[in-house]
């Protein structure tokens, strides 16, 4: 959605009764290959800050969201983009955090964003090139 950031995309989705129960995946990385993994017309991949992306997957359970997240991670790894400034990794990798949420009358758009951010932080804490739920 041109002209709006990831927070606004999530706020709008959570405000709409038809889309408020969708899972959100936050992905760290700068790679167009991510859009090749998101193939359903109902799914959305959007930049969410500097090097983060949010992947919104309506009608997707945690297991299926995890599979898609792993495909995103592997798609970036398969690019073999040299990571010249890193002393840890030869190639660019990503960390992926997966969270899902069912719609609730009293929930706000901030809840799934906060949950996704916590899971992404878990991936960052546990290492590189990994997916966490």
Image (spheres, grey):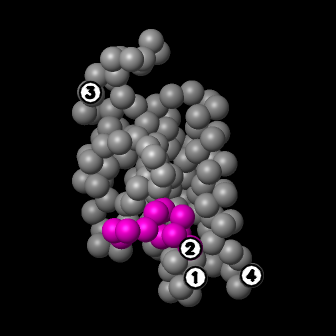
Instruction: Kindly check if marks 1 and 2 are in contact, taking CB atoms under 8 A apart as contact.
Output: yes
Q: How far apart are marks 3 and 2 (CA)?
A: 35 Å
Q: How far apart are marks 1 and 2 (CA)?
A: 6 Å
Q: Nearer the viewer, residue 73 or 8?
A: 8
Judged left or right of residue 13, residue 3 is left
Query: Nearer the observer, disc 3 or disc 1?
Result: 1
Instruction: Kindly check if marks 3 and 2 are in contact, taking CB atoms under 8 A apart as contact.
Output: no
Q: Which of 63 and 95 is in front in this view?
A: 95
Residue drawn at the location 48% of the way across and 70% of the way down: 9
Q: Answer yes or no: is residue 63 visible.
A: no
Tell me the crowding category of disc 2: few under 14, some 14 to 19, or many 20 or more residues within 10 angstroms, Cα based. some
**Label drawn at residue 80:** 3
Residue 13, above or below 62? below
What range is drawn magenta here?
A: 1-11
Residue drawn at the location 61% of the way across and 61% of the way down: 113
Q: Return the disc, 3 or 1, that comes first in the chain's sequence.
A: 1
Which residue position is annotated with label 2? 11
Which residue position is annotated with label 4? 106
Q: Return the disc, 3 or 2, that comes first in the chain's sequence.
A: 2
């Amino acid at each position: 959605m041109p002209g709006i950031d990831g927070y606004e995309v999530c706020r709008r989705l959570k405000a709409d009764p038809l889309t408020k129960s969708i899972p959100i995946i936050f992905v760290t990385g700068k790679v167009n290959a991510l859009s090749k993994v998101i193939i359903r017309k109902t799914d959305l991949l959007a930049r969410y800050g500097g090097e983060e992306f949010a992947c919104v997957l309506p009608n997707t359970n945690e297991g299926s969201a995890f599979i898609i997240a792993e495909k995103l991670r592997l798609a970036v790894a398969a690019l073999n983009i040299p990571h010249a400034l890193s002393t840890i990794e030869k190639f660019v990798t990503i960390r992926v955090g997966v969270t899902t949420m069912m719609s609730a009358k009293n929930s706000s758009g901030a809840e799934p964003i906060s949950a996704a951010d916590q899971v992404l932080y878990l991936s960052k804490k546990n290492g590189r090139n990994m997916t966490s739920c």
